Amino acid sequence: MLTTFRKKVKGFTLIELLIVVAIIGILAAIAIPNLLAAQARSKTSRAMTDTKQIVTQAQLYTNDNNCLPQNGVAPCTAMGAMPTNLWNGTAPGTTRYMAQTFDPWGVGGGANYLYNDQIGGAQTALTSEIRAWSVGPNGTDNTYASDDIGYSNYSGNRP
């Protein structure tokens, strides 16, 4: 007779639900910082690869045209801002030296990498140092600050 009055209750108790929610919260607290760190490592790796590619293609440009990309000597007089001109077709002969790329640390991910082929602000010979760098995690150009990420073709001590 008692079995007719008792219904089998199916479901979870409040304690069981709280335990599951707590476990999910703990797992999320562990996973989210790891995910953010992985994204930062990915952006850093991308910036290192892109800056090396920019310097390599700028060296190829220099070999092809016998002038540094920014020195204003023909046929480089009509050049746009570096490194944009490596992919936008403004290089002599409308050559595209690489695919378009943007600094992953730039504002909104749409800023160009920074570039320089001068030493001490003066235009120098074709053996000049070519540098490309990303603004880094803080998102501002501090020109060779500790958080900037970049690459240079210069070997030896920097002048």
Image (cartoon, rainbow, N blue to C red):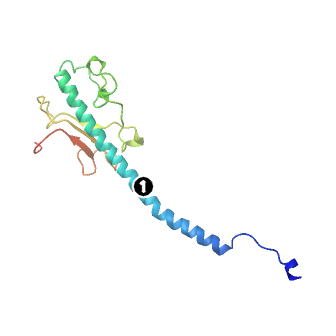
Q: Nearer the viewer, residue 39 or 6?
A: 6
Above or below: residue 6 compared with residue 39: below
Quadrant including the N terminus: bottom right
Above or below: residue 26 compared with residue 134: below
Q: Residue at x 25, y 43 (%)?
A: 150
Above or below: residue 94 compared with residue 3: above
The kind of secondary structure element at disc 1 is helix
Q: Nearer the viewer, residue 129 or 15?
A: 15
Question: What residue is disc 1 on?
Answer: 36
**Can residue 71 be seen from the camera position used here?**
no
Q: Residue 35 in the image: x percent, y percent? A: 43, 56
Q: Nearer the viewer, residue 11 or 2?
A: 2
- Callout 1 crowding tier (Cα within 10 Å): few <14, some 14–19, many ≥20: few
**Can residue 54 be seen from the camera position used here?**
yes
Q: Residue at x 88, y 77 (%)?
A: 4
Residue 158, quarter of picture: top left
Q: Residue 8 in the image: x percent, y percent? A: 79, 74
Q: Residue 36 in the image: x percent, y percent? A: 42, 55
Q: Nearer the viewer, residue 9 or 106?
A: 9
Q: Residue 119 in the image: x percent, y percent? A: 14, 36
Residue 122, quarter of picture: top left
Residue furthest out toward the right:
1
Q: In the image, what residue type sits under mark 1?
A: Leu
Q: Is residue 128 left or right of residue 32?
A: left
Q: Is residue 34 left or right of residue 114?
A: right
Q: Residue at x 14, y 30 (%)?
A: 123
User: Count of labels shown?
Assistant: 1
Quadrant including the C terminus: top left
